[in-house]
Image (cartoon, rainbow, N blue to C red):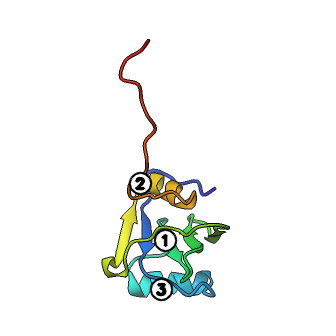
Amino acid sequence: MIPIASGVRVWIATGHTDMRRGMNSLALLVQEAFTRDPHGGDLYVFRGKSGKLIKILWHDGLGMSLYAKRLERGRFLWPSSADGVVTITPAQLGYLLEGIDWRMPQRTWRPQAAG
């Protein structure tokens, strides 16, 4: 798991990305298309066309890391491509990685009173 520090922002690249890209070309995409610094410590999340594979690009201050996750069943829920770049919270990223709808997660039932 990625140790996400407080204050780190998670950026989702809407639409689909060519999953043959490696960390250098994804970092270049962040720099040119998002006009963001890929070495700033934020996380950048990309999804493939099929929706089953995502890649996360992260620079921890020492080096660049590229994480990949593929769902065996289902698809990662993704914002529409008209939104451009979307920021989410680290908690929403956790839902996303579990294949849960990060936009409206279902809360568990909570009792109103004890006893």
Tag 3: residue type? Leu
Residue 48 image point, x, y percent: 55, 80
| CB under 8 Å between discs 1 and 3 | no
What number is the disc on residue 29?
A: 3
Residue at the extreme left: 82
Residue 59 image position (x, y, % from top left): 56, 69
SS at badge 1: strand
Is residue 109 placed above or below 1 in the rendered structure? Answer: above
Which image quadrant for residue 88?
Answer: bottom left
The part of the image, by quadrant, that contains residue 78 is bottom left
Residue at the extreme right of the image, as rendered: 72
Q: Which residue is mark 2?
A: 7
Q: Residues within 10 Å of mark 2 (few under 14, many from 20)?
A: few
**N-terminal label among 3 and 2:** 2
| Percent coordinates x, y for residue 22 in the rendering | 63, 84
Quadrant of image for the N terminus: bottom right
Instruction: Give the amino acid type for the residue marked by disc 1 in the picture.
Output: Tyr
* Discs 3/2, front: 3
Say if mark 2 contacts mark 1, CB within 8 Å.
no
Asked which quadrant contains residue 20, the reply is: bottom right
Please, what secondary structure does the residue beneath circle 3 have?
Answer: helix
Q: CA distance from mark 3 to mark 2?
A: 23 Å
Residue shown at 43% from the left, 42% from the top = 107
The tag on residue 77 is: none
How far apart are the alpha carbons under marks 2 and 1? 14 Å
